Image (tube, rainbow, N blue to C red):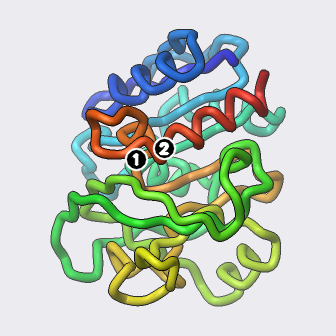
Amino acid sequence: MKSAVVLLPGLNRDRDMIAALSRISGTRPATVWQTDTEIPEVDLIVIPGGFSYGDYLRCGAIAARTPLMRAIAEKAARGVKVMGVCNGFQILVEAGLLPGALMRNDHLKFVCRQVKLRVENANTPFTRNYTDGQVIRSPVAHHDGNYFADTATLDQLEGEGRVAFRYCTEAGALSDEGNANGSARNIAGVLNETKTVLGLMPHPEDATDPLLGSIDGRGFFEGLVRALA
């Protein structure tokens, strides 16, 4: 699997993502910078987390309007897999590659802890190493992760199997208790219409080594390697 990780001013999870991809795929990903307008021929493009451009205006708003994002949108239109984690998710939404919006957490506080996620659709390149309904553990670290969309969009996402993950309890129940940020219908990650673009707030790259406290994120990357081999 050939991959590329996006580098933007203010992002701070690029090294974590590079380490996870290198560890599991056996190949170090390429890196692309904000002013690049050409992206190497790769199978997967990842926009990692952080605070691109200081989160000025809105989280991801400036990054979404860079020449690099236009190039990524063109790659996505041709079927290249694209994943945005945390701030990367916010950028994908701002760029119009995914529906909805990411608002302030409902408790108006930065949240940084392990959460439980329920896999909602295991029939995608990003989730194929899991099973439907499986509960996994992953860290989150965000202030604006409260996913919102209008009722019609939420119904469409659910009807088309485009909800990838939901926040849940240890037992897999959907409740306010298990919701890390107040997201509509406990949504933690969504897919585009062709299920080739994924955005999610949790950080699976930081759950790939026992030293990190969880290896539940390994299945995420191992499934991608299998899907894109």
Residue 130 seen in render? yes
Secondary structure under badge 1? loop
Image quarter in which the C terminus is found: top right
Q: Position of residue 21 (x, y in %)?
A: 51, 23
Residue closer to the observer: 59 or 27: 27
Q: Look at 56% across and 34% down and name the residue there.
A: 69
Disc 2 versus disc 1: distance between alpha carbons? 8 Å
Of the residues under marks 2 and 1, which one precedes in the sequence? 1
Q: Position of residue 67 (x, y in %)?
A: 54, 28
Whether 101 is drawn above or below 142: the answer is below
Residue closer to the observer: 98 or 145: 145
In the picture of the structure, the residue carrying the numbered disc 1 is 203
Q: Position of residue 172 (x, y in %)?
A: 51, 77
Image quarter in which the N terminus is found: top right
Q: Look at 31% across and 39% down and name the residue there.
A: 52
Q: Give the residue at the far left of this rendering.
A: 109
Whether 158 is drawn above or below 208: the answer is below
Whether 195 is drawn above or below 158: the answer is above
Q: Look at 56% across and 20% down and name the residue there.
A: 4
Q: Position of residue 92 (x, y in %)?
A: 55, 49
Q: Nearer the viewer, mark 2 or mark 1?
A: 2
In the picture of the structure, the residue carrying the numbered disc 2 is 217
Q: Amino acid at mark 2?
A: Gly
Q: Look at 21% across and 81% down and name the residue there.
A: 107
Direction from residue 102 to residue 225 in the image, left or right: right
Are the residues tagged 2 and 1 within 8 Å (C-beta)?
Answer: yes
Q: Amino acid at mark 1?
A: His
